[in-house]
Image (cartoon, rainbow, N blue to C red):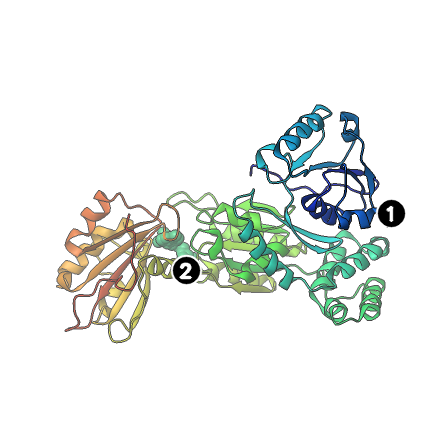
Amino acid sequence: MKTFPMFLQMQGRRVIIAGGGEQAAQKCRLILKTEAAITIIAPSLDPELSDLHGQGRIKWSAATVTAPDFADAALVFIATGCPAADASLHVLAKSVGATVNVVDQPDLCDAITPSIVDRSPVVVAIGTEGTAPVLARQIKTRVEEMLEPRLGDLAALAGRLRDRAAMRLGPRMRRDLWRWVFAGPARDAHSRGGEREAARMIKEAIDTASFGASNEGTVALVGAGPGCKDLITMRGVQRLQEADVIYYDRLVDPEILDLARRDAERVYVGKAPGCHHWPQDKISGVLVAAARQGKRVVRLKCGDPGVFARGAEEADALNAAGIAYEIVPGVTAASAASAALGGFMTERGTCDTLVLATGRSEVAGKTPEWLNILHPGTRVAVYMGVGAASNIADALQQSGLEDHVEISIVSRAQQADQTIARCCASTLVDTIKTKDISNPAILFLTRPHVGTAQHQMAPHAVLAEA
Ligand code: SAH
């Protein structure tokens, strides 16, 4: 970030606008939304500014500007319409250390005005550091649609009731209360115009401490997707934002943790292959213990929590402890890898059976279990399969399927350093070596129907291969 968003205190402060034309009027309109005292410094005013001056809403000085005029101002806007005059006023304002915005001259700006969605006291500011104002406006339009017009009044009502809640409820209950207020019937009532009804509901909830909150902890086994921030589900994000503590895995994109509350505890319980720092029963144990303390627990797993994620063991432990849990699905690595290939995991008439298998259970010299069901029209997605590549190649060769199976490999699917390779059984080991493919990777083994044209998994999209 070259610029950092902050909300400036404007109550009782001065804002100076140098210039009396349309550009100055635009800034004036913006600042009139605040409680700052506006002074326009200009030899003359356009009709709009003149009108505002006539109404006593702004001050006006036609005198020659001097440095002390800018001293102690919360903000200085320079908008004379004349670049040379703007530049010399900028020097003057900087000589007293003012925070300056020179209209249309980003190089002379200490501060940039954002696109604003105003539901005061709820204010959303959108900035693109001057790179894409049109995008900022598009985002503003979407946020405008998202936030009901009366939301600011509801926030203000909540603000007035904060002390009442603080007197009667502890911190955790208060968090539950406000979550209930902003996601439940009180907000619905308020947005329909029922301000009094909403106020009554919230007061009653505070006084009786009943708003669907409970002191029991919960656990959500959440799928984080294949390791990039934008492939987690919206429900997953919601659970992250509600969480008091998050136990996360090795392959989870660290940026996903930014979606959680800032004060949520984050605990890494990653298991690198071959070195189990956190044995599974210890992980299950901490989930149970945290939930027993009444915490909202998220167990964040890469991909989908139901695919090779040892979710069942954690669920068993939670069941045994009588703790409620929820499973929030995620985009599993095979889906991510298939999409990265520009293909589809199943295709009518070509591949009607899909098997998810793990290379970890493969023992050298032993036939992989999926081999018996690798009939024509079947595709096997092998997870954790890189280390088992030579076993897989041997098994395909020994069973006579070597020439009937197409192989696609996707390493770090949907990540910046994604790698894609295609080969056959006889070239599998070499391909992995020469392309330097490592885990996490998915191996797709596809046995097309007899008679279908040689079919590589990727005919549907143009791909940039690594
Ligand atoms: N629950 C996960 C799987 C966990 S097992 C899921 O549903 O995806 C870990 C294995 O998943 C890795 O060894 C690799 O085979 C696969 N994997 C995870 N993320 C991947 C990615 N971004 N690209 C390719 N494979 C991935």
Query: In x, y percent, where is residue 409?
Result: 27, 54
The numbered disc on residue 300 is: none
Residue beneath the point at 82% across and 71% down: 197
The numbered disc on residue 56 is: 1
Nearest the camera: 367 or 159? 159
Q: State whether residue 33 appears in this view.
A: no
- Above or below, 95 against 423 in this view is above
Residue beneath the point at 69% across and 27% down: 94
> Quick one: which residue is furthest to the bottom in this view?
349
The numbered disc on residue 332 is: 2
From mark 1 to mark 2, how far is it between C-alphas? 63 Å
- Mark 2 within 8 Å of ligand 1, using the beta carbon: yes
Q: Label 1, secondary structure: give it.
A: loop
> Quick one: which residue is furthest to the top in this view?
95
Q: State whether residue 70 appears in this view.
A: yes
Query: In x, y percent, where is residue 6?
Result: 68, 41
Left or right: residue 78 compared with residue 138: right
Label whose residue precedes the other's in the sequence (1 or 2): 1
Residue type at mark 1 is: Gly
- Above or below, 329 against 132 in this view is below
Nearest the camera: 91 or 341? 91
How many numbered marks does the figure carry? 2
Left or right: residue 222 compared with residue 125: left
Nearest the camera: 365 or 171? 171
State the image quarter where residue 303 is shown: bottom left
Left or right: residue 423 compared with residue 419: left
Of tags 1 and 2, the one toward the viewer is 1
Residue type at mark 2 is: Thr
The quadrant of the picture showing ligand 1 is bottom left
Residue beneath the point at 19% across and 63% down: 405
